[in-house]
Amino acid sequence: MSFSISSSYNKLRAVVDSTPNDALPSLSNLKKAEDSLPSSLPVSGLGEAATETHLLTDLTPGFNGPKTSSNYYGFVTGGVLPIAEVADNIVTAFDQNVQVHLSDQSIATAVEDRALSMLVELLNLGDGWNGKTFTTGATGANILGLACGREAVVDARLKAIGESGGVGELGLLGACLRAGIREIQVLTTMGHSSLYKAASVVGIGRASVRDIATSKDEPWKLDVDVLERQLKGAKEGVVSIVALSMGEVNTGRFATDGLETMKRVREVCDRYGAWLHVDGAFGLFARCLPPTAEFRTLINSASGIELADSICGDGHKMLNVPYDCGFFLTRSSTILASIFQNPNAAYLSAGQSTIPSPLNNGLENSRRFRALPVYAVLLAYGRDGFAEMFARQVRLARGVSRFLSESEDFELLATQPNQSGEFDNVHIIVIFRAKNESVNAELVKKINDTRKMYVSGTKWEGKPACRIAVSTWRVDVGRDVRLVEEVLGEILN
Ligand SMILES: *Cc1c(COP(=O)(O)O)cnc(C)c1O
């Protein structure tokens, strides 16, 4: 039987469109999907038509709904804007390998470069981001951030004693031995788990990541005096990277509270030779909200990020492009290449160009053209389109916050209304718990068992808590606040 990709795409769309808006599949659909998995590799294949039927009718009903449901509030997942889905299909159909800039052969690297520079514009980061690349996600970008920080702080020590080479050339052990370095510490407040993973990957070690938060009520917050004391008091042979959580994943709150604080952080880092990295996976996008009183507190909290040496962000969250997509920005034009240079492969030479070959700027050589969906959404929505979409997301999170704060049964955590009664520091994450301990112990399970909306469980002050993260373009504030109220009401009965 002949197999037609175009009719297959039509069938795919029909299946997606008829997928219920539920956040989770039914248990019976999950079971059916599981039972349909082959027990081993078929000797003679099923053929494409039968495989297509299997994928569409057996497997897809067993998928959860972060991208198809309006009410999937787990993790921070984002949705997929329609044009991003189209772009992603184009990526697959043309399968460009974005590793070497070959300007006379493919437009792909130029598109990637333009997508990155438009992203910098969307985020209002100003000029001078000379090192930029797409990554698989914020974890990948945090790995790049710590790798760059490691390279820079070790290199500075080597230079100071008249040595050259750097970690990329000498290796971490060799370079640190020569430079008299015995630890690279990473100072943070409520650093994302991926920061610890990144520290392990780049040889800094998870144990060298130190949470220097001092406030019990606001543990996401960086106290610049404490930071300065830590840097100043660092033991002989200890060099530092400062990693700010700008958009902490449990609370959505920011490590600093405005440009003045960020300027102080910058000064302190310069004084003690520390690299300043910002993890802004989703929080970065607070910078793109409409510049009105409604969002002023958030825009302030996210300001000054442009003073960092490096920035990590996610595309597959707030930007609503498909997995996987993150990005990394650094001011240095050379540091990425000093780590990621793919040496001695003449056939990979790009010749003279202002666009660097991605293979010398990041982890991979062969890479997916994950820039295209980003390019497409930036072009399709522009600054205003994203401002409007992000505003809706924040309004939903604030609507839910208001409901929780007025409820007798729930306790809203990590935020308080301002003097005008507005939840002006709520971005897209709401963290709360049930006042009744026995309800609280089961809260996440009970909510998710309704399968109408999905939330993540977390801990707050040692007790279980529940977290709602709003990140899809599908948000309809009125409809979705009502649904959350309904579900939370239902589980108490
Ligand atoms: C999601 C997230 C990460 C990890 O991102 P991935 O895209 O899952 O790799 C890192 N930091 C923060 C603050 C996040 O929210």
Image (tube, rainbow, N blue to C red):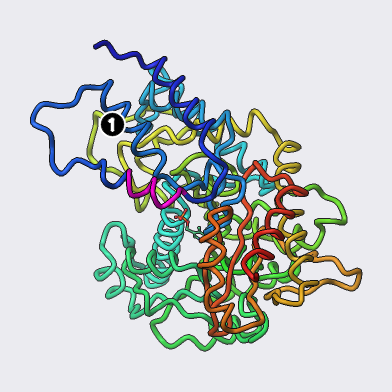
Q: Nearer the viewer, residue 128 or 396?
A: 396
Q: Nearer the viewer, residue 132 or 92?
A: 92
Residue extending furthest front? 493
Q: Secondary structure at mark 1?
A: helix
Q: Amino acid at mark 1?
A: Leu
> What residue sits 71% from the left and 47% below the top?
390
Q: Is residue 170 above or below residue 367?
A: below
x and y percent of residue 477 in the render? 75, 49
Indicate whether residue 29 is drawn in magenta.
yes
Residue 378's spot in the image, x, y percent? Answer: 63, 34
- Residue 289 horizontal side relative to residue 71, left or right: right
Task: In this rendered view, identify the residue nearer to me: 77 or 54.
Answer: 54
Quadrant location, the N terminus: top left
Please report the residue visible at 76 percent of the width from the left and 57 percent of the height from the top.
299
> For the stretch drawn in magenta, what is the main secondary structure?
helix
Question: Would the CB of label 1 be found within 8 Å of ligand 1?
Answer: no
Instruction: Write down the residue under mark 1.
Output: 348
Residue plotted at (85% across, 72% down): 418
Do we see residue 303 in this rendering? Answer: no
* Spot occupied by residue 144 in the image (x, y as percentages of width and height): 42, 56
Q: Is residue 324 above or below residue 421?
A: above
Q: Quadrant of the C terminus?
A: bottom right
Whether residue 210 sits left or right of residue 349 in the image: it is right
Magenta region, residue range: 25-32
The answer, for residue 360, to whether it is visible in the render is yes
**In the rendered image of this protein, does residue 446 appear above or below residue 80?**
below
Q: Quadrant of residue 246?
A: bottom right
On whether residue 209 falls in the magenta region, the answer is: no
The local crowd at label 1, few if under 14, some if 14 to 19, many if 20 or more residues have their Cα within 10 Å, is: some
- Please identify the quarter of the rendering in which residue 358 is found: top left
Picture coordinates of residue 223, whole percent (x, y):
65, 81
Identify whether 349 is placed above or below 394: above
